[in-house]
Image (cartoon, rainbow, N blue to C red):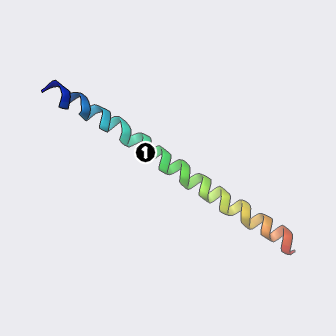
């Protein structure tokens, strides 16, 4: 009975990490798109 109880908090601890990773991916993606847009504007102007 103690094994399932130990697994539950581990799953709960992983969920915020996955959310933080998703946010980090979103920030990197947004920064990357802005950076690429700026480079393209510099090249074509």
Mark 1 burial class by Cα count in 10 Å: few <14, some 14-19, many 20+: few
In the image, residue 6 above or below residue 29: above
Q: Position of residue 4 (x, y in %)?
A: 18, 32
Q: Residue furthest top?
A: 2
Q: Position of residue 5 (x, y in %)?
A: 19, 29
Q: Residue furthest left?
A: 1
At a point 24% along the width and 34% down the height, the residue shown is 8
Residue 12 position by quadrant:
top left
Name the residue beneath numbered marker 1.
18
Q: Position of residue 32 (x, y in %)?
A: 67, 58
At a point 61% along the width and 53% down the height, the residue shown is 28
Q: Residue furthest bottom?
A: 44
What SS does tag 1 mark? helix
Q: Position of residue 9 (x, y in %)?
A: 28, 32
Quarter of the N terminus within the rendering: top left
In the image, 21 versus 3, the foreground residue is 3
Left or right: 33 in relation to 39: left
């Amino acid at each position: 009975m103690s094994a399932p109880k130990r697994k539950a908090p581990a799953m709960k601890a992983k969920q915020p990490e996955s959310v933080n990773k998703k946010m980090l991916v979103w920030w990197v993606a947004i920064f990357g798109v802005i950076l690429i847009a700026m480079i393209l504007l510099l090249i074509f102007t």
